[in-house]
Image (cartoon, coloured by chain):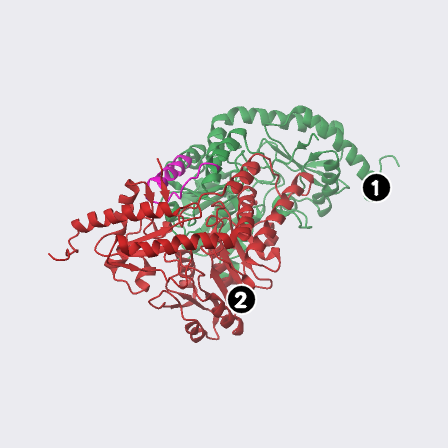
Chain colours: A green, B red
Amino acid sequence: MNYINLDNISFTPLLPEVKQVMTEAVNSDLHNPSSQHKAGEKSAEIISDARQAVAGLINAANPRETVFTSCGTESVNHAIKGAALANREKGNHIITTNIEHNSVLRSIKRFSSQGFKVTSLPVDASGRVDPKAVQDAITDQTILVSVMHSNNETGTIQPVEEIGRITRKNKVLFHSDAVDSVGVVPVDVEKLNVDLLSFGSNQYGGPPGAGGLYIRRGTRIFPLLDGGVQENNKRAGTENLICITGMAKAAELAAKHMKERLVRLGEIKDYLVGKLPGYIDEYIVNTNLEHSLPNLLNISLKYIEGESVMLMLDEDNMAVSTKSACATGSLRASHVLLSLGLSHADAQGTVVISWSIDNTLEDIDKFLASLSGVVKTLRSMSPLYNKPGT
Amino acid sequence: MNYINLDNISFTPLLPEVKQVMTEAVNSDLHNPSSQHKAGEKSAEIISDARQAVAGLINAANPRETVFTSCGTESVNHAIKGAALANREKGNHIITTNIEHNSVLRSIKRFSSQGFKVTSLPVDASGRVDPKAVQDAITDQTILVSVMHSNNETGTIQPVEEIGRITRKNKVLFHSDAVDSVGVVPVDVEKLNVDLLSFGSNQYGGPPGAGGLYIRRGTRIFPLLDGGVQENNKRAGTENLICITGMAKAAELAAKHMKERLVRLGEIKDYLVGKLPGYIDEYIVNTNLEHSLPNLLNISLKYIEGESVMLMLDEDNMAVSTKSACATGSLRASHVLLSLGLSHADAQGTVVISWSIDNTLEDIDKFLASLSGVVKTLRSMSPLYNKPGT
């Protein structure tokens, strides 16, 4: 069965080189890196090398500024809960946006009963936050601003660098959820002026089970996982060497091949966007084509349901998604799309197409042909759809 | 180099069968289990099967009562912080013991500024908590009792079943940190009357990077990782399928081979304890030999430092530890040993010997011969040691 994966945002296969180093790690009896005898030293070195590779990918000045976590979600929870609690005495105000991932929104909400006040900024119709709105929202009580780097549903990239200049000027901590950006597009913690940056590993060919949190030196933050002294006392728990090894290899390759991957992914995007109107009509492009990831396109198909489209495409052996895999099972329309101004009905017609360097233009052709048929079939059954000319 | 690992408490090698399933998982492009298309279904099934295997090991009535985490430390943080915050309106009193792992002690401490009151119970000279002391400490404000199943430094097993009867009777939530017990000795959540039970995977031949938290149905608890709807809405973050697969295989094998492993490990323990006096004198056994894990012995060697013993044994190609690997770098004497009534000097002389089914009696012979020489050398240099007869 030739299955075409256009749901890379939910699942990017491990890179062959990542599979290799992880297979080796699984089979090489790596000792606890915290142990002080010979057997532990080799493992400590592996972690140190991994931290170097990851620092290279995000341009961290010091590798020790990155803490390894179990996933992007843990990084985000650590950043928000850890920074909010550690700076509680300075103030109680947090600024975020309406389109953040649930890991951000729910981490903030967890504290809403504990005296924290939240300002959630809107986005414009193109899906971007206005940096000026961040400036206007800052008060003397503001301790944290959290704005994502790219949105996981639309791929739209936010003006993080401009926001970073504002937070820096106002001496407010700035966290950016860059889970869908790091390893895909250039992310430079120095240029962005972030104090905290969350990222994963499985968005660029590393394993789920490994993530990172960049913590700028001197940033006041509590651990999320209290206990042992691992990770320079910032994240307790025996280190997951197997997945960290895979993450480091993926980071190394992402940095090395960034340019050529961007070109390749961008070609697929241009091809898809250019061809779409020849196959379907009455759709909305929810991705900001000027500022967005090169590997994702979000469209809403009028009069039909994205979920039905996804299931019918699955029958044709191709995977797309309708929203964040993290929101599977939720029947509600995406908060991100509603924030863009879409109606509930249009938001329900959403399909997210996401590719990797392993996809070909032929995959896109097959997808478009299949999509065209699926849309016709579903619209023919849709009570909302008035056929033109009838 | 033939390296003898008697530091299994820090590091137990992956079982061959675990290596095999993890190698397969690394190389088989397992899709995101939350995706709803065909590719995601297989992964969802793998997680469901894994949950079944783990439920079998701890005798959980319903597999869905176990949440997969990234490690034992995350499980403990989730249990304590999640239960304390979720039940804050019922009361503010937490009961624990003086000998808990730092993941428990520091998780509780994290909240001390937020109006929680803590009673920390002592242990007797044999290292055990008196269940009656738990009963006496319970007030109408008590919302959580946390007592470990076995101690990670001494291996001493606590009267968890009796404590569970008391907490059940008093309708107080009961968490047990069973990270060093599950997979090694029988742990039955029904028999123990626990509401929450933390465990890992790497203590019984599974990988670091996978742990579990048993949450009895109906227990009020918040997630530690907020975000997506994974793990029945109890733990957000893309599932670490590779490590979960390894954990499940280790759990299956632990349950299957529990009896024979207990016999084998117990033989090694009896052999070691019986032979020790023939090789060294003036030492204290800190392990409660009647109630303890079968794979660990903690002794304090008078007049010398455990750290020097560990380093010299390392030169002889054998690994032991001096305390929890999680406390590496801390120069303070173990809080566990001080709680047993040891002096600071004696506590500093501690060596933890821990073995697996892969160790042989010959390993123990080699260790004893080596230890005997090391102790003689170190005591000959020790200003604290008055040689007999001089």
Foreground mark, 1 or 2, reads: 2
Name the residue nearer the viewer: A325 or B294.
B294
Q: Nearer the viewer, residue B331 or B181?
A: B181
- Residue type at mark 1: give it: Met
Is disc 1 in contact with disc 2, using a CB cutoff of under 8 Å?
A: no
Residue B88 in sight: no
Q: Is residue B388 left or right of residue B30?
A: left
Task: Identify the residue at image location x=87%, y=34%.
Answer: A389
Chain of the residue that carries numbered disc 2 in the rendered image: B
The Cα atoms of the two marked residues, 1 and 2, are separated by: 55 Å
Q: Could you tell me which chain the residue with mark 1 belongs to? A: A
| Residue name at image x 28 percent, y 40 percent | B315
Q: Quadrant of the N terminus of chain B?
A: top left
Residue B326 vertical placement versus A260 (above, below): below
- The kind of residue tagged 2 is Asn
Q: Would residue A149 be counted in the magenta stretch?
A: no
Q: Is A43 one of the magenta-colored residues?
A: yes
Residue B310, percent across and down? 29, 47
Residue at the farthest right position: A390
Q: Which residue is mark 2?
A: B193
Res B22 seen here: yes
Disc ID at residue A381: 1
**Element marked by disc 1:** helix
Instruction: Say the numbered circle drawn on residue A306.
Output: none
- Give, as a single range, the part of the protein colored magenta: A27-50
Q: Nearer the viewer, residue B258 or B312?
A: B258
